[in-house]
Image: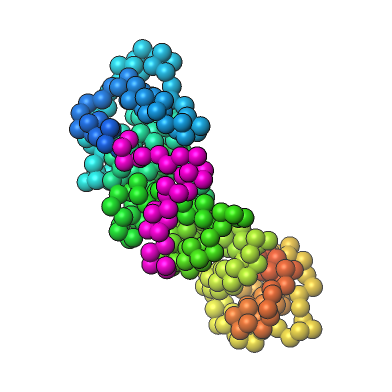
């Protein structure tokens, strides 16, 4: 099951469709009918007439999507045509593909409608952008609809290739069933759910989607973002940020030797810093002056004490107050270093 669970999901697509829609749509037949559109220049009117005919024949289709009427379009939009042969497997991920999707979106307005048409015209490379599949992948939204769809296609094609599906559309169908099987109540399938949650490839793909918006953050800012969401990760990232920023501060102030000694000695329990964060900031700004080292020593000793607790697993749960202090302090050191650089 661990290696084949997505193919098992694909095999259950007809059954789940009946449970969801009351019928099992023949998607391969729709693909076959759309095949002539792949290699010719296609007008907007042809696309609308073709897919409105499909919608009229499939009750499940009309439940979720409504294609526009040709009469709803401006005259210049009616005259637009598309060379869909550019949307070949060989052009996956290229500027040509992105441009074609942009052109379709300008006319059809909704990326979901564009994704439906492409899924049936080129099932080898495309899938429908739907909330259930986006949810199961923890899909990262882009700056606009096209970038979001391209993010989805990148995920879908990786899954297609890794699990050896014949087409991206098959991978899409399997993921749709997977989300249904990982639901609650009567739809829950513990065996498939466990296989999915222990699948290393899917875990890495979903983690990449989740952290993508954070990739531009510094380690200090990342620790701040994680605080209150996952204090374990906030503390660990904060510890890394502490090392990174203290080293930069020490280099810029010429007190590297002193900083190393403070890190090794730590601070006695009774010398936890009493000064405010503002006092710490002022002490940092005085740099390597003798008068500034004592308050800095107290704070760094305190912060390194928190680091040691985390790295040596001395505590089961990080103290939220200590994590907050750590995050505040590393942000202050980072800001000081940024000011020094500018």
Q: Nearer the viewer, residue 247 or 206?
A: 206
The magenta stretch is 1-30
Q: Nearer the viewer, residue 91 or 272?
A: 91
Relative vertical location of residue 338 with respect to residue 254 in this rendering, above or below: above
Q: Position of residue 317 (x, y in %)?
A: 69, 75
Q: Nearer the viewer, residue 244 or 26?
A: 26
Q: Position of residue 171 (x, y in %)?
A: 37, 52
Whether residue 229 can be seen here: yes
- The image's colouring method is rainbow
Q: Is residue 80 left or right of residue 8?
A: left
Query: In which image quadrant can residue 184 be found?
Result: bottom right
Relative vertical location of residue 221 with respect to residue 116 in this rendering, above or below: below
Q: Is residue 150 left or right of residue 270?
A: left
Magenta segment: does it hold 7?
Answer: yes
Q: Is residue 81 left or right of residue 186?
A: left
Whether residue 336 can be seen here: no
Q: Position of residue 166 (x, y in %)?
A: 28, 52
Q: Position of residue 291 (x, y in %)?
A: 70, 74
């Amino acid at each position: 099951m661990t290696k084949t669970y997505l193919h098992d999901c694909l095999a259950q697509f007809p059954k789940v469709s009946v449970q969801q829609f009351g019928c099992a749509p023949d998607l391969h037949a729709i693909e076959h009918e759309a095949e002539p559109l792949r290699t010719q220049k296609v007008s907007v009117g042809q696309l609308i007439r073709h897919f409105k005919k499909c919608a009229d024949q499939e009750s499940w289709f009309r439940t979720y999507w409504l294609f526009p009427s040709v009469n709803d379009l401006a005259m210049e939009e009616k005259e637009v045509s598309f060379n869909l042969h550019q949307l070949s497997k060989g052009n996956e991920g290229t500027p040509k593909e992105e441009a074609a999707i942009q052109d379709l979106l300008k006319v059809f307005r909704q990326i979901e409608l564009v994704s439906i048409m492409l899924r049936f015209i080129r099932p080898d490379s495309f899938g429908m952008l739907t909330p259930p599949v986006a949810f199961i992948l923890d899909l990262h939204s882009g700056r606009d609809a096209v970038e979001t769809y391209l993010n989805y296609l990148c995920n879908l094609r990786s899954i297609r290739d890794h699990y050896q599906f014949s087409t991206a559309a098959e991978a899409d169908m399997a993921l749709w069933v997977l989300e249904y099987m990982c639901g609650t109540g009567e739809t829950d399938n513990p065996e498939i759910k466990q296989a999915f949650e222990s699948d290393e490839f899917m875990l890495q793909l979903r983690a990449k989607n989740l952290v993508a918006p954070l990739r531009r953050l510094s380690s200090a800012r990342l620790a701040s973002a994680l605080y209150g969401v996952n204090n374990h990760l906030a503390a660990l990232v904060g510890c890394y940020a502490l090392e990174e920023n203290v080293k930069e501060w020490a280099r810029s102030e010429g007190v590297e030797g002193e900083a190393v000694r403070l890190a090794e000695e730590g601070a006695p329990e009774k010398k936890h810093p009493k000064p405010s964060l503002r006092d710490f900031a002022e002490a940092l700004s005085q740099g390597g002056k003798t008068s500034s080292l004592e308050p800095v020593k107290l704070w760094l000793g305190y912060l390194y004490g928190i680091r040691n607790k985390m790295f040596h697993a001395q505590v089961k749960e990080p103290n939220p107050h200590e994590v907050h202090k750590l995050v505040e302090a590393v942000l202050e050191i980072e800001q000081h270093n940024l000011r020094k650089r500018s």
